[in-house]
Each structure stands twice: as structure tokens, then as C-alpha cells.
Image (tube, rainbow, N blue to C red):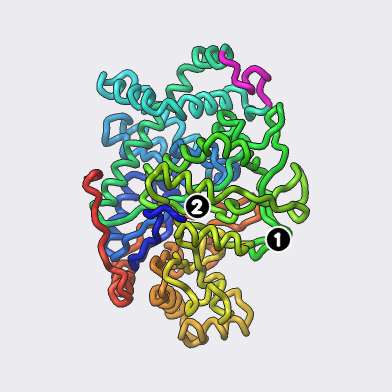
Amino acid sequence: MPSPRARPRDERRAGVLLHPTSLPAKYGCGDIGPSAHRFLEFLSSAGQSLWQMLPITPPGRGFSPYDSTSSFAGSPWLISPEALVAEGLLGPSESNRARLPPGIVDPPRMMASKRRALTEAHRRAMTGTAAVRGSVLAFARREAAWLDDFAMHEALVEATGRPWPDWPAALRDRKPEELARVRRELKGPIEQRFFEQWAFARQWQALRTAARRSGVHLVGDLPMFLTLHSADVWANRTAFDLDGRGRPRAVSGVPPDRFSARGQCWDTPVFAWRRLQRAGFDYWLRRARAASRRFDTVRLDHFIGLARYWRIAPGGDARRGRFVPVPGHQLLGAIAADLGELPFIVEDLGAVTPEVVELRNRHELMGMGVLPFGWADPKSEHAPHHVTPRTVYYTSLHDTDTALGEFLSEPARRRRLACETLGIDRHAPVHETCRGLLRTAYRTRANWVIVPVQDVLGLDSSARMNVPGTSEGNWRWRLDTVPRRRAATQLAALVRHYDRDRALRPDPQLL
């Protein structure tokens, strides 16, 4: 039986999907400072009660938020230099030197620029008032269970230029005397990471408090897998299926599906589920706690991986993998017992089997629907007329083209069917097509409707965030400016018309 508190979110809500890196900012990358607070104001004026983000942990290869180096740390690239200036931790001249031209994110250039600013902010914090120094050190002690390993890992990667499986055996295998030596010799770089996580936590808490005061519910994202070259895998090796040298015995991915005809090989190590279960799923419980402390609700990425995962030989072909069962019921039961609820929505797209459906339904979790997946197929479960209340319905996703881009790329027959579904003239101007997409999603029975900001603004394929199966040019898209009043007015009208304007109750603990 499901936990009595693991119930679906039964209110009709509306929200927007926007990753903070896509916000406009002066430093080469959106962040959680003033532009994020302005976006909250936009959401509130537009009647939106949900802001969904991609993972806010440190990004890995290709700047991907789904290839993170930690489940627990916040991305230092989301720290706002403007907020540091306001706190006296960065001078205006250092802040100005960190500025970069507007446009898409250029990760190497942005990281180098922000790293210089964060280094200066750390120097000021440690040589400034005793109150600031004490706050940073108290935070480091409070979060030591994960922060010590993360900070040491990041400092070592920077010092050696190599990932942890390539370190000397004593360091790779975490011999206590080696770790003690590293703490002494890399004290400065380690404390730099302590400071960055302290700064991130303060700025994040300010944003979350503002969101609650605005009646906006923050929706996060918990990736299923971690990159091998992460602090998590180094510090929790028994949770993963690795050999004695720290190399994966198998990697994860998916078989061929609607996103990739050749399947996808993610090269991320798979979990050692039997060992995890014997240990009471401790590592997963810590991941869930960390995510639930930051967000009101968390999207479980690749939910089918909690029913079974696609196991691929290292360096192998994704088409030649095999499915392996996972104790998903036991894991979700353990999380519900630990947290008192399951604060999740689930990404249940892909190879959905009866076991996946049963796992989702037994634990009363909301699944996902995607309008373009069903607008030309009346029998699809994604078709607007088939969407059930226990659904989060999207006009597009970070892994798909924008809704307009998808619509314009459809063959003539499918576009004609889509127009019939959307109730629009197939010769209508583009702006009317975009309004029709939003109206269709809003009027469904789905409890939650979430529209990527690209679809709010009616943007085409040039605003796409990610192309699955490719490694270049993704995760770079950015807004030029926070959406204006006209977009807010149009969304607010939809919210009222389709009864999605019930305000969230503020949490007194966060006010």
C-alpha cells in the first residue's frame, strides 16, 4: 500500500519551465540573483504558481545539468555576483570585470570569469568581519557530511587535472592518511568550495523565501544517474557497480526510442541495487532529503529506471543492452517513510511498461504528458482529450524542440491533424498557432500544466535547449530579457479562464 501522504497534487495549477542559466544576466550565464527575482515577479503577475527548473547542481560534460558532479552541491555558476556586491563580498570593479556580452552561454569563458570573481569574494569573506567568517565555517561544519568530500574532490580535480579513477591508488581508494594530507595541502582551494556553497545556499534561500511569498511553488529535478567523474561516486563507491579500480562494470542508457533511433549510451555508472537495498537505500535517502530541502516538489528524471534500467557494456552499443529489474517499490517506500511523503512528480516517458505504470500508480505519483506527442494521434495517451488529472502536461520539454519548432517541422498530414486537435486554422499566422498550443494545454484535465518559457514567447527551433544524443552546443540558450507585461497578461487570462488560479498557501516556516 502507498504511504497515506504520497498523494497526487490535486489542485489545478499552471507554471513555466525555465532553467536559471537561461535567465538574462550580465555575467555570461543566468543566475539566482536579481534576474531570478524579476522572473518570480513575472510569474506572480502572470498568475503562475509553479516554476520548474532543471537540476541546479554543478554541471558536468558539455555544461549538462544532467551530468552533475554532485547530488548535494549547488552550481557555483548560479551564484550571483550582483548579490555578492550587495553583501559587500565583491567590489564593483571586480564585478564589472566579470561582465560578459549578452547572448548564449559560453561555458569556458563564463566559468573562467566567474571563478575569478568568486575567488576574490572568498578572499574578502575570510579577511573581513568575524561574523562572515564564522558563518562560512559554521555552514561547512553543518554540511560536512557531503561538503567535505565535494570540496576535496573539486580541489583535487583542479590540482591534478585528472578524474578520480586516474588518481594514485591510495587517493582513489580514500585512504585516511591520504585524505588528511590533501586537507592540509589543499586547504585554500577546499575552503574556496566551502565559501561558494555557503554563498549559493544563502542566495538560494533568499530566492525560495521570495517564491513562497509570491505564491510560487519551486519544482526541481533529480537526475537518475551521476557521472563517474563526480564527488558522489568517489565518496559512495559501494552504491555503484564498479570494479576494484573504480571503473564501471556497466553503464546506463536507453534503447532506441522517439528521442534517438540508435538509443542512447550515457556512460554513467549504474547503481549496485542489491547493496543499496541491504544498506537501507541510505545514499538515495540522502539524495532525496537534499532535493526536498531545496524544492517544494521534485521531478524524478528517467522514472522507468526505478522499475528497470538499461544495462550496457562499457564502450558498448546502446542497442545491445539489456533490462535489469530495480527494487523501485522498496526504494519509494523507504523515501516516503524517511520524508513523511513522496514530494515527486515523475518523468515516465520512453519504454513505459505495465511495471512502470504500476509503480507510478501504486505510489500515487503524477506522470507526464507532452502535447506534441499526441496532437496528431487521437489514440495517444498524450492526446489532449486523453490526459488524466494525475498528469503534468507540457507543451514541449528541454529534450524536444520548442512547440512551435515541432509544429513547423511536422509533415503536412500531421500538421493538418494537429490543427484539428488544437482547434486552429492551419493557415493561421504563427502567433495564433502559439496561442492555440497554450489554450489546448490549459484546457485539459491535467492538474498541472507547465509551459517552457520558449513556448510562452512563441519561439522557434533556434531556442531549443538540448538535442538528445548530441554532445555539442546544448544547454546554452538564454533569454535577452525577462518576459514583458504582454506575455504576463496573456498567461493570466488563460489561468483565470481555465480555473488554474488557486493560490498556493504560504509555508509559515519560510516566511
* In the image, residue 188 above or below residue 110: above
Which residue corresponds to the image point at 30% horizontal and 53% vertical from the top-left? 38
Pinpoint residue 433: horizontal percent, then vertical percent. 46, 79
In magenta stretch: residue 169:
yes
Q: Position of residue 495 (x, y in %)?
A: 31, 71
Q: Is residue 353 left or right of residue 429?
A: right
Locate residue 251: give its quadrant.
top right
Given residues 211 and 80, the one toward you in this image is 211
Q: What is the C-alpha distance between the residues marked 1 and 2?
A: 21 Å
Image mark for residue 256 = 1
Q: Is residue 436 above or below residue 25?
A: below
The answer to whether one can see residue 102 in this image is: no
Neighbor class of circle 2 (other Cα within 10 Å; few <14, some 14-19, many 20+) is many
Disc marking residue 242: none
- Residue sitting at the far front: 1
Viewed as shown, does residue 249 lie left or right of 161? Answer: right
Q: Amino acid at mark 1?
A: Pro
**Residue at image x 71%, y 27%?**
244
Q: Which quadrant holds the C terminus?
A: top left
Of marks 1 and 2, the one in the foreground: 2
The part of the image, by quadrant, that contains residue 82 is: top left
Label 2 SS: strand
- Identity of the amino acid at label 2? Leu
Extent of the magenta region:
166-176
Horizontal and vertical percent position of residue 333: 48, 48
Residue 394, percent across and down?
Answer: 47, 66
Q: Which residue is mark 2?
A: 300
